[in-house]
Image: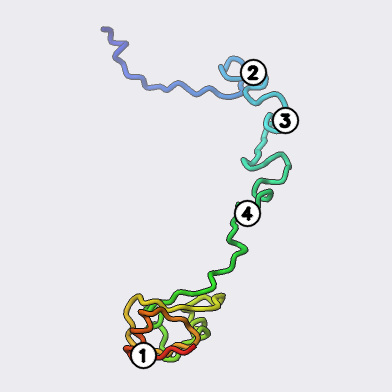
Amino acid sequence: MSILSSIIKITAKSAKRLGRGYGSGKGGHTSSRGQKGQGSRTGSKVPLWFEGGALPLSKRIPMWRGKGRFKSLQTTAELTFNDLNKIELSDITIDSLKLNKIIDKRFKKAKVICKGKLSKKVNLKGIVVSAAAKKEIEALGGRIED
């Protein structure tokens, strides 16, 4: 075995440069740009989504941007006992929940479900309550009014 074959390469072969003549190994004439058109010209930067001036796909099919943009929030807010504990009032209505930012202002109704631990006596007005939550509220001395 000769010494020349054991020598480590220290130079890398340079990449073929596009469109630098026939001698470059990759070029000459159109050099992989096709014949004519926008993409063959110098400095052409066409966005990936561009469709030659046609109406873009995102506008042709507007529902792809989100069907939910027309849908309002769910009509009923779900409340837990932890949410009721955050309010310092004893008489709770939907308006007081909205003012204290417990529920979003777009909600029309609210329902209390039995989740968490209720730590105080509350009186609910105009709020629907589940059967298990009603037991706990009344056990603490609270009232539920329609």
Q: Can you identify the residue that label 2 sits on? A: 28
Residue at left offset 60%, top offset 52%:
64
Q: Amino acid at mark 4?
A: Met
Q: Secondary structure at mark 1?
A: loop
Q: Can you identify the residue that label 4 sits on? A: 63
- Residue 96 lies, in percent from the top left, at 50, 86
Closest to the camera, between mark 3 and mark 4, is 4
Give the distance between the C-alpha atoms of the residues marked 4 and 2, in whole angstroms.
47 Å
Give the distance between the C-alpha atoms of the residues marked 3 and 4, in whole angstroms.
33 Å
Mark 4 closeness class: few <14, some 14–19, many ≥20 residues within 10 Å: few
- Residue 57 lies, in percent from the top left, at 66, 46
On screen, residue 11 above or below 101: above
Q: Tell me which corner region of the image, top left, top right, bottom left or bottom right, holds residue 137.
A: bottom left
Q: Can you identify the residue that label 1 sits on? A: 121
Closest to the camera, between mark 1 and mark 2, is 1
Give the distance between the C-alpha atoms of the residues marked 1 and 4, in whole angstroms.
47 Å
Q: Secondary structure at mark 3?
A: loop
Q: Amino acid at mark 2?
A: Gly
Labels in figure, total = 4
Mark 1 closeness class: few <14, some 14–19, many ≥20 residues within 10 Å: some
Mark 3 closeness class: few <14, some 14–19, many ≥20 residues within 10 Å: few
Give the distance between the C-alpha atoms of the residues marked 3 and 1, in whole angstroms.
77 Å
Most extreme residue toward the top, as rendered? 1
Q: Amino acid at mark 1?
A: Lys
Circle 3/circle 1 CB separation < 8 Å? no
Circle 3/circle 4 CB separation < 8 Å? no
In the image: residue 124, left or right of residue 141? right
- The mark nearer the N terminus, 1 or 4, is 4
On screen, residue 98 above or below 40: below
